[in-house]
Amino acid sequence: MLTPAQRTGYDRDGVIVVPDVFSPAEIEELRRVTDDFVRNAAHVAANDEIYDLEDTHSPAEPRVRRLKAPHLHHPAYFRASRNDTVVAILKEFWGSVRFDTGKLNMKSAGFGAPVEWHQDWAFYPHSNDDLAAVGIMLDDVDMKNGPMLVVPGSHKGPVYDHHGPNGRFCGAMDPARLAQAGGDIDLSKALPCLGKAGSVTVHHVRAVHGSATNFSGRERRFLLFQYRAADAWPLLGFAGGIEKFDELLLAGEPTLHPRLAPVPVRLPLPPAEHQGSIYENQRASGRRFFATAETPRVAAE
């Protein structure tokens, strides 16, 4: 499924881009469904169990920055989360695959919100770090429309502090305090994840990543699903119980023996002051790295 170069790249950098995983027809369906969700957001006034809204959202101009757990709200998203090629790629890495959850991040043209530097591992540490997120590009992604940026090799480094000035978890790293965590990380070397619609990214759970505001005149919709090996168990527990946990198994056999690995862990406690998506968590981060747009702005193309 993966070439030797892709396997080497993932081990070295903690991220790869795999082209042509989803067909044009599949991408067109996902775009159409997504457009329907955005139109329906005109009837939503505040963040809820489905929508995370841009600060400039209004009924006249619905602006959505995230759909939460989209696989629970439409069969097209559910099918995408179980894509055979995606499962086969992850099975090559781990031998088994268990689904976790998902979200659809939407960087709308001219005002799509940034995501500050962070590690997914900070949000949901497990008994081992055989976890990854797969991002499905619903649009062509280039340097102008806010691509995901990943610091190569950072998945082999420390788990960084994601707590804010008030001591509570905020889901963002403070660039000014990175050296205090014992790591030597150069954010300027971050690799942009670029590709055509239908391509997917695979990034390691400990990889440091973020994305800038979309100041272009084009959409950048990115459907993200999280996966883990069958023997990777969440340290904060699984509220649904073992039966629901095993229902998420996509490849391999269930096990009652979590694999314990000597990986760095920092718990996301006390919980975030602003509960909800990462956008809400990061409100309390204090120092910001990426520029934001107060009002919509579209660059000349």
Image (spheres, grey):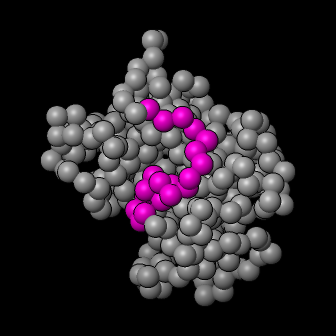
Estimate the x, y position of residue 58 in percent, counting from the top left: 21, 40
Work out whether 163 lies above or below 5.
Answer: below
Seen at 80% across and 59% down, the residue is: 180
Q: Can residue 152 be seen in this view?
A: yes
Q: Is residue 283 magenta?
A: yes
Q: Give the prevailing secondary structure in the magenta stretch.
A: loop
Position of residue 246 measured from the top left corner of the image (x, y, whole percent): 48, 78
Quarter of the image for residue 124 reads: bottom right
The answer to whether 281 is drawn above or below residue 29 in the figure is: below
In the foreground, 141 or 109? 109
Compared with 142, 50 (above or below) is below
| Location of residue 37 by image quarter | top left
Give x and y (percent) for residue 139: 45, 31
Q: Is residue 82 visible?
A: no
Q: At which x and y percent is residue 22? A: 47, 39
Instruction: Find the magenta span and give its range.
Output: 274-293
Q: Which residue is found at the position 43% from the left and 56% from the top?
A: 280
Indicate left or right for 121 with 71 as reference: right
Magenta stretch contains residue 87: no
Direction from residue 51 to residue 282 in the image, left or right: right
212 shown above or below 156: above
Q: Residue at x 59, y 62 (%)?
A: 165
Name the quadrant containing residue 23. top left
* Near-viewer residue (27 or 261): 261
Q: Which residue occupies 44% across, 75% down?
A: 247
* Towards the viewer: 271 or 243: 271
Query: Total of numbered circles in the picture?
Result: 0
Outermost residue to the front: 166
